[in-house]
Image (cartoon, grey):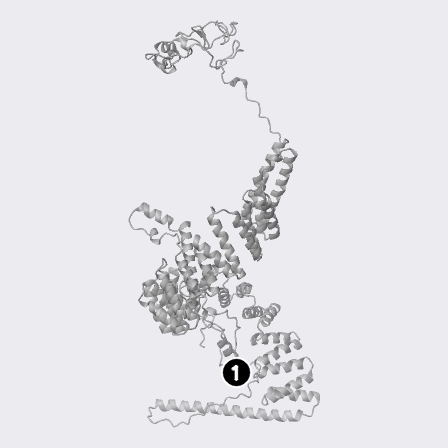
Amino acid sequence: MENVHLADEEEDLYSGYNDYNATFDAEELDNDEGFQQAVRTSHGRRPPMTGKFPGTAIGGRPIGTSFGARIPMTSSMGRPMTGAVQDGTARPMTAVRAAGYTSSLTRGSTFDPLGQSVGPAPPLESKNDDTPEEKIKILEKKVNDLIEESCLAHSQGALQLALEKAKEAGRKERALVREREQCGAADHINIDLTYSVLFNLANQYENNDMYPEALNTYQVIVKNKMFNNAGRLKVNMANIYLKQKNYPKAIKFYRMALDQISNYHKEMRIKILQNIGVVFVRMGQYSDAVTSFEHIMGESPNTRTGFNLILCYYATGDRERMKKAFQKLIAVPLGVDEEYKYISVNDDTRANMVIEAIKNDKLHQMERERKSLAEKFIMTAAKLIAPAIETSFAAGFDWCVDMVKSSQYVELANDLEINKAITYLRQKDFNQAVETLKTFEKKDSRVKSAAATNLSFLYFLEKDYDQADRYADLAMNADRYNPAALINKGNTVFVKQDYEKAAEFYKEALRNDSACTEALYNLGLTYKKLNRLEEALDCFLKLHAILRNSAQAMYQLANLYELLEDPQQAIEWLMQLISVTPTDPQVLAKLGELYDAEGDKSQAFQYYFESFRHFPSNIDVIEWLGAYYIETQFCEKAIQYFERATLIQPTQVKWQLMVASCYRRSGNYQKALGTYKDIHRKFPENIECLRFLVRLCTDMGLKEVQDYATKLKKVEKMKEIREQRVKSGREGSARGRRSEVREGSAGSAAPSTTVPTPPKKLDLTDSGHSSRGTSAKGERLSVKLRSLPGSNEPYESNSQGELDASYVDPLGPQTERPKTAAKKRAEDDDFADEELGDDLLPE
């Protein structure tokens, strides 16, 4: 208690803490009159002290410190100097020495507190790269740079370069580890850098389809306990096994990866479960796949998993569960904003600018893609399960439509109805398809236009052009900006040969949709019909720019250049065409024809031979090849071609005569004689065959020469009589017509008593007199015209969103192939020069 000090009540325990010496108050210097007076005097602006003033280092006056007594020096205001003794107590110094002053100050030196008079600083010492620490730092930087270069090369598609960089990074990293071990710093190995190198190397192996190497690298990472969360990479290993179709191992590694991922990472677990379900589907184990998909639909439902679940139930034939899965699918929330969000509703300029900016940004594009994918899944699922969930297809489809109408996809109900009609088309129930589409005539404009477009398309395929025209008009009235409706209207006008009007409809369709390839193709055909070849060429060049691999566009370009008398360009386009369709026999035959016209027989033979190899029943190709071998003095090889022509057209005597002629030209007279005898048995009135029989029998000294000579004279006489009869009949008919004209001009009212000439009897016995007979020519042309569709028929158009593209009419113009038949020249007046495929031909 003796050391305890009790304070009095009046004593202030905190007194003195706020006291301070005003001498050290720098804030009040502006108000200190003495200090301001000193500043204004010459004493306040005195020059630096020199040796003549007392108290300097030159004067030999020691500088006092706080450890020893010194003479107190005061300023002009009487303030104590720093470190001076005041009231017998030494105040500690605030610095070792005063700023700007040194103890070595000599006479004549200037005030230089920054030391600028000394000169530039010495250069920095260069780093020594030979030290182990610097080597390690340089190696680490090289490894990181190589990893970055590898990733950059992969992003640019240079997969091989990316792999090489990844391998080099691995070599540098191993060198780095050895360097650390030599320096005794093995404990400071950069584990993250090693992980990055191995992971990048495994990725590049996988990208280059080097799956065993990638699996080995991943295995090195997974087995190393020093790498945190390396177990997740088993997902990558499972993906590789899936690519290798090693499904059991893929499922094993997916499940191992699933065990390594906590429940906190819910999205990752859902994706792995989805992969497991897909692998089970590929293995055909639908019940196991259903387990995975049902778990996902319970935890985090999505449209893809819902669609897969429907497929599994369809595969197992579970009708009730198919219905429940479809209901789950249409109940999946999309998380997509409504479209009205992007429609401006007021005159706010700033808001409208924002709407225009976000109307087609990447987020809105992603939303549209997600919605489109969901609609595709729903439509496909409805078409799949409709025949299976009810007793009939129509009842099942009606159930799906009812479910969709009560969901968030209300606008899909009409599309489902249209797909119902398309399914009827696939089942070849055209009446039901038409009836279903006719129910949309009282719907809103968009649906009405789509249904009318499809109806017009159907009637056009059935060649009911009046109905097609009617529904095309209905579709146009419902939606004038529907390009498919305009194309159908143009097609109905095209078949009526009103090409100018058809071109206007095609142009309007192109104005509404510049990427409408059907309109562009049909416009080119229309210009071709109008003989505006340059404009047609421009249309097909634009079409080729859009559809690079369109065989029809390439053929039309080749045909136009041929019409423009530019065979080299025609050959060039046909060469591009055979790069797309290398086995088209008619394109190859057309190339052979063009090369033959250019005088290049070897190239012509090559393409004709390829055409024959792919289609050995083309009479024109067979005839050209046979004539080529005869011209090149290889008659034995020509025989096989003419024998094939005989098999194709056994009633045409000229092919058999060519076979006998080849035997005769090659010196095999016995075989030629036997062939002529066979021809004579089949065609006993063929004069050419009898002439060759008489000649051969005479040359060979056979006794049958007299018989054949007698038959020849008899047949020639019969031919003369027949020709005279025909000639007299023609003259009589001509006289009868002249007499009728004279009687009519004289105004006679008496009926004509001219006896009608009996119909001319067709002479079939002399059909083989000429090797290029008229009747054979006409028959061959007519057969080809009937067998091939016209190359200039327009595309039928249907709305791409409403009519399923997989339905193709096998006889429709959409299945046309380029026509490459050569120009045929008849030797009489019955057939004019024409090119196959230039006109729409009647069936």
> Residue 77 location, x and y as percent?
39, 8
> Residue 6 location, x and y as percent?
37, 12
Left or right position of 109 against 671: left
Q: Residue at x 52, y 88 (%)?
A: 763
- Do we see residue 526 in this rendering? no
Left or right position of 617 against 368: right
- Do we see residue 557 in this rendering? yes
Residue 717 vertical placement versus 836 (above, below):
below
Q: Quadrant of the C terminus?
A: bottom left
Q: Quadrant of the N terminus?
A: top left
- Looking at this view, is 136 or 567 the one in front? 136
Query: Outermost residue, right direction?
Result: 701
The image quarter in which residue 430 lies: bottom left
Which residue bears the numbered disc 1?
Answer: 775
- Looking at this view, is 11 or 408 the one in front? 11
Q: Residue at x 38, y 49 (%)?
A: 358
Q: Tally the marks.
A: 1
